[in-house]
Amino acid sequence: MIKVVHYINQFYGGIGGEEKADVKPEVREGVVGPGMALKGALGSEAEIVATIICGDSYFNENMEEATKEILEMIKKYEPDLFIAGPAFNAGRYGVACGTICKAVKDNLNIPVVTGMYSENPGVDMFKKDIYIIETANAATGMRTAIPAMAKLALKLAKKEEIGPPAVEGYIPRGVRKNIFREERGSKRAVDMLIAKLKGEPFETEYPMPDFDKVAPNPAVKDLKNAKIALVTSGGIVPKGNPDRIEASSASKYGKYDIEGVIDLTKETYETAHGGYDPVYANEDPDRVLPVDVLRELEQEGVIGKLHRYYYSTVGNGTSVANAKKFASTFAKELVADGVQAVILTST
């Protein structure tokens, strides 16, 4: 019997939603939440001996400590297999699943499997290290995600040969293998070209990454009369983080009024970002969001005016989909407010 340990977050563990995202790691014997479906998919070949539960915020804000604690919990069961999630498009959950899977693989030397939506930030972070089954965007895809994860996990545990991503359902890892084909490469290439010219379907043997191409705007013609806005992914927020922007895998952004503010002080502003050492940013938030310098340029007449609002979020692990959603929303507001240029700062 293959012994399995399963990892889930506080929501799927039945503890609570975002208000319970700070709960520390805990272990429960046997099956919890989606583990019931996983148990059914694994069948008689494997047994879920324990379930580890941890809050998404706690894990991402205490990553090193939480990983060590969870590893110790897992070691006690001496499992043959570790399965995390699925996390779908939940960013912090995906980062947690990926981090723990990699740690288990590296430290315990056992197979690991998780599941995520293709745009989950955990995918880009861990797809080269572990097997990640591609899932739907939301938990509505649980019925297809769990069987696919179980099937691949069992093959790994039994040390069976793992097929290509299109066959097994995992997200491509960037690993290429030499295989033999009946037809030589030149003929296959010509066949694909002919199919392409005819508008017929074909499948490339060497898929390339798909990157967005954004054409740069022309330079600002009249900077002395231009209204300039500040936007940051460095997480600078008013003291206390009133909008509760997450330290990692942000699901929101904040809009803050700086009318009359000449300098961002440590008494009034701080960073919510969990992906860099916050000491220097908290000592002087202008290091990340240069309000002080823009005020000087405003007074000197180099720029016309600094926009009264700035927009802030956290770039640490934030999904591409969320980042695009944030930008498309506040870009409309900036244009409507007559902003001619934006200075985007990061860390």
Image (cartoon, grey):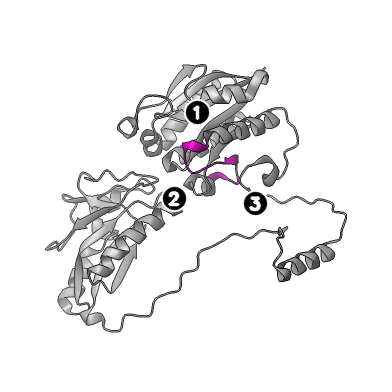
Is residue 319 one of those drawn in magenta? no
User: In this view of the protein, can residue 11 be seen by the observer?
Assistant: yes
Reply above or below: 154 against 281.
above
Q: Magenta segment range?
A: 126-141
Q: Which residue is drawn at the image coordinates 66% and 34% (left, top)?
A: 152
Earlier-in-chain disc, 1 versus 2: 1
| Residue 120 rendering spot, x and y as whole percentages | 48, 46
Check the picture and name the quadrant holding the C terminus: bottom left
| Residue corresponding to mark 3 | 174
The amino acid type of the residue labelled 2 equals Ser
Q: Which residue is drawn at the image coordinates 83% and 66% (left, top)?
A: 186
Earlier-in-chain disc, 3 versus 1: 1
Residue 215 figure quarter: bottom left
Q: Which residue is drawn at the image coordinates 40% and 28% (left, top)?
A: 10
| Residue corresponding to mark 1 | 7
User: In this view of the protein, can residue 100 be seen by the observer?
Assistant: no
Check the picture and name the quadrant holding the N terminus: top right
| Residue 256 rendering spot, x and y as whole percentages | 21, 56
| Residue corresponding to mark 2 | 319
Helix, strand or loop at disc 2? loop
Left or right of residue 182: residue 258: left
In the image, 333 versus 272, the foreground residue is 333
Structural distance between the alpha carbons of marks 3 and 1: 26 Å
